[in-house]
Image (cartoon, rainbow, N blue to C red):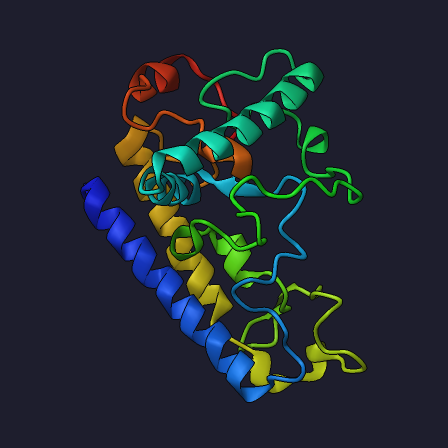
Amino acid sequence: MATMHAILQRYRALLTTLDHWFAAKQNEMPQAIVCADGCSGCCRGLFDISLLDARLLRIGFDQLPAATRAEVLAKAEARLVELQERWPNFVPPYLLNHMDDSLWTEMPENDLTPCPLLDAAGRCLVYADRPMTCRLHGLPQIDKSGEIFLEEWCSRNFIGLNPLEMGTLRHDFQQLFTEEFTLLRAFAKELCGLDRAELDTFIPLAVLIDFEGFDWQGWADREILPT
């Protein structure tokens, strides 16, 4: 079994290849793609992320100054209070997989609450450790084979254009997601002994999850998750 360090390093490398692709598209179409470090128009509401993404995000968070961490934690805890009012049994490790998908996959589109990991200027405090969904957001996801994984894009991008018709935007998404799921399974196996690719939480809750002190094996032994 791969060690946790090796899994995290492989995932970082995978995210880096994604960043290089995204940056290349920005360089090719600077007028059409306005997404960039410092743009936070989509950094609001509740995005669900994998537990592996949450682990990386937590690593980045733990490196922030103490005063900054305290501010972020206060915002994240306020979000948790809101969620526990809706779901009283929502307890550590704050995973979504034991709940019916309909309860959390259709969060309000009009939720304008900023991500707690934004600073006062709207810049991401953990940009180097941000989740995959943050790195992908803004462009459609079209595999080189033509298969469409996501046909949506940021409304600030491609004004007057249809990116679904742009062959240059295609990427090896099938390979990317296959490698991602391999690492998600390896991570879950190493963390708690579960052979699962889907363990998910919300971005604000990632900073509240105790990856080091929580009894993950005990939780896995008593938790029954949908397959």
Asked whether the viewer can see residue 84, the reply is yes
Looking at the image, residue 59 sits to the left or right of residue 135; the answer is left
Task: Please count the marks in the image.
Answer: 0
* Residue 80 versus residue 154 in the image, above or below: above
| Residue at the image position 37 percent from the left and 20 percent from the top | 220
| Residue at the image position 70 percent from the left and 73 percent from the top | 157
Write down the quadrant of residue 62 in the picture: top left
* Residue 124 versus residue 171 in the image, above or below: above
* Residue 59 versus residue 209 in the image, above or below: below
| Front residue of 220 and 201 | 201
Spot occupied by residue 87 in the image (x, y as percentages of width and height): 66, 17
| Residue at the image position 28 percent from the left and 48 percent from the top | 8
Asked whether the viewer can see residue 193, the reply is no
Spot occupied by residue 64 in the image (x, y as percentages of width and height): 36, 42
Write down the quadrant of residue 170 in the picture: bottom right
Spot occupied by residue 188 in the image (x, y as percentages of width and height): 35, 35
| Residue at the image position 40 percent from the left and 54 percent from the top | 180
Spot occupied by residue 34 in the image (x, y as percentages of width and height): 63, 74
* Residue 42 versus residue 1 in the image, above or below: below
Quadrant of the image for the N terminus? Answer: top left
